Image (cartoon, rainbow, N blue to C red):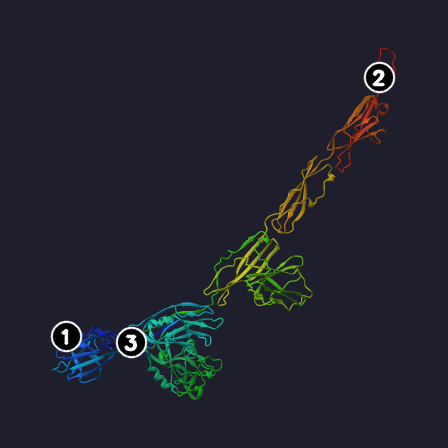
Amino acid sequence: MKYILGLLFTLVLGFHVIHGQETYSDTFTNFSYGNNDGSMTFDGNWTETGESDNPGSGRILIDGQRLRFQNLDNSYITRNLNLANALSATLTFDFQRTNGNEVVSVQLFDGTSYTTIGNLNGSGSFSYSLNANQMVYNAGIRFISGSGGWSNSETMYIDNVLFSVIFPNDPPVVVGAGDQVYCNGSSTPIAQSINITDPDDTSTTAVYIQISNGYVIGEDLLTLTGSHPGITASWDPVEGKLTLRGPASYTAFENAILDVHYSTSAANPTGMRQFSITVGEANFLPATGHYYEYVADAGITWTDAEVAASNRTYFGLQGYLATLTNQEEADFSGSQAQGVGWIGASDAASEGQWLWVTGPEAGTPFWSGTAGGTTLPPTNFANWNGGEPNQSGNEDYAHITDPSVVRGGAPLGSWNDLPNAGGSGAYSPQGYVVEYGGMPGDPVLNISATTTLTMDNTAPTWLTATGALDENYQCAADVPSLAACGALNVTFFNEAQYSWGFGLQNNTGSQIDAWEVRITNADYQLNASQLSNQSAFVYTEVDNNDGTYDLILSGTGPIAPYGSIPGGNIEWSGVNFGYNPSSNGTSVFCGALPFTPPVATDDCTVANISIVNDAIINFSSASDFTRVITYVATDSSGNTSVPFTKTITVQDTTAPTASNPASVTVFCSADVPAPDINVVTDEADNCIGPLTVAHIGDSTDGGTNPEIITRTYSITDSAGNSSSVFQTINVYNVEITTQPSNISTVAGTTIDFMVIANNADQYQWQVSTDGGTSFTDLVNGNGYAGVQTPNLQLLGTSVDLQKNSYRYRVLVSNSTASCPPLVSQAAILTIGVRTIVTNRRITHRVNKN
């Protein structure tokens, strides 16, 4: 059985013959006994005996570009050559006698002695085929006199001495390298290196390069690039074969092979391509390591084709009708052949039991039954045409089907069963397919070099590490963004119940790399999947939490000078908002990309790195959200990478600031002011956004006079960061520490009632004349002074018995307090009668005054 080799892209050199012709020649063109005008080199120069080995003098010399003999008696000339291993050799030369009748004998050396093979008499051409004894490593030729009595005038000329020798022609050895990726749209060399060595040849006539696997007719193409004098190229689209035709040296063909490029018109080719390159027309299939040849011979019978195939050889490989045991082999020998013909399958031995009957697979079953039958192990493969085999008239032999009658979805190169003589029309035999390789006794050939072209199906990979581009900001305003753009003109902006859209025009002669359109405070949302030209933008939406949205459409590609959005306007024509939508309109931003994109690498070229999504997630506030930008890299073959995400975290962690409000002092608990957030006047934050001031609570130190109340206010930003400020409220109460005291006096004495009070700045003394039932305010005058001071003075002139038992009190208060005055306790004024003591025994009662 043939076996599958792991070869992909192969260079092969081979010939139908394994013999090569070489020549030893001397045309005596140069004035030397050392001329070598053939492909081989003589073993030494011509050597004279009886002479001085001088080509310019003596009886033997070169004259007029010929070897001349004159008066040759007792002189001769010889030259040796190596004919070891020669299969055949022929000696030819021209001779001319110009004077006399003497004879020159031609002799050959057989390794032991010289033997005369001819006598030259007159003029003419000489030819002699050497026998096996004369083809030795030290063979030689000698010209010697064949008669005696030469005179000085007798002359013979010899010219164009030629040995035409057939040597065994060893196959060349080819070493090549190349395991490459084909990038879409490119023209790629099929080999990266190639070296051809041949022990007995330095040139050849042609090289045949074939796409031996994966060939797609009408798409794949091989071309010879560069300048290669003496070598022409022709392309056969049926076989998928490029012929490089010389003759040229192996070196020249090596250079040409390195300049053979593969290309395809397919937008997205897949798989891989195998190539075989041969010197000789047999095609090489790397998967089997065998060679295949279509031989045109119209009308040949299957039995005659079997014999003819077995009589063919290729570099010593035995030929046989092809045995096609897998699809790759069947395609290669069928759809990529120049014609259709017999193959080595038959059910003649047992009807319906199809066997391979030629080559190393002879006797191997592969099919049982007619159409609808089953494949058989070990190959489990058949490639019948639709409805075949059908045994329509003793059809016992397999033939590749003509393309015009392929049916039933069968591939080109499928098979039909035919009688030994074939059929008529499209079923008439056109030739046969010969396979070489795998037979017992076949030589081992090293005439193949293998490389690979694999269609690029590998996606770009990211060089930038995950997370390397992530950024953190305190405030949304800190995030880099595009600048307001006057270079882009909004050609239209339509907000209607049944349609929505906008267009942009670049007003400048310069490319605009990045652009963004923002629709603020829209009372509607967009369905990005319903918008036209979706590849031109990425849609982002921000909920303002007030029934409106900010809609952001960011361009994915540049806008050319004086151009519009790539692909056209962005519109939503199938919408029905149900009302006439509105917004604050559009704002356009543009410029350079605000973020450095990630870097990707690829087997081919990274054609584009684009933003495919730009979304805000986990939105809590304008200063607390996450923005995720998603990039995708696309190579020149259309392969896309896994997404790369850049995370921008906006999280305000800085609390607002504010000064403590001014402290407050009151002199009445009732006058403690109600909480008022407006007392915080200088609140500020690192981010733009509203700040909320709130009263948190009051705390007291529990003291009295003063009682210190600490009032706390919080300042909170939109991210929830909060700080506190504190206001001190001092509460002082009016209190009487020393009450007015009762006074007993005598009429006519000035007296003072006194009160001592804290935190008081207002006093009003009162008097009660009815024993404390009622009090009236005093005014200065009429014997009273200091009625609104801590000390009430009653002048002596006003102190009389009439005021006896009057009661005095004071109202103590603070002018800033709303609390009622404190009322002191009443002090009683007692006025006594003055007593006079004399030395008389008479006592008078008198009034105190």
**Left or right, residue 287 beside residue 62:** right
Q: Earlier in the sequence, mark 1 or mark 2?
A: 1
- How many other residues sit within 10 Å of disc 3, few (<14), some (14-19) or many (≥20)? some
**C-beta proximity under 8 Å, tags 3 and 1:** no
Q: Position of residue 681 (x, y in %)?
A: 67, 45
**C-beta proximity under 8 Å, tags 3 and 2:** no
Please say if 41 is above or below 482.
below
How far is the residue under mark 3 from the one under mark 1?
40 Å
**Left or right, residue 668 beside residue 447:** right
**Residue type at the position of mark 3:** Asn
Name the residue carrying label 3: 169
Under tag 3, what secondary structure? Answer: loop
Residue, far left = 149
**C-beta proximity under 8 Å, tags 1 and 2:** no
Please say if 523 is above or below 359.
above
Question: Looking at the rendered structure, which numbered label has been put on residue 51?
Answer: 1
- How many other residues sit within 10 Å of disc 1, few (<14), some (14-19) or many (≥20)? some
- How many other residues sit within 10 Å of disc 2, few (<14), some (14-19) or many (≥20)? few
Q: What residue lies at 62% left-to-right and 55% top-to-bottom?
A: 620
Q: Which one is closest to the eye, mark 3 or mark 2?
A: 3
**Residue type at the position of mark 2:** Thr
Name the residue carrying label 2: 835
**Left or right, residue 290 beside residue 44:** right
Q: What residue lies at 49% left-to-right and 57% top-to-bottom?
A: 465
Q: Position of residue 57 (x, y in %)?
A: 16, 75
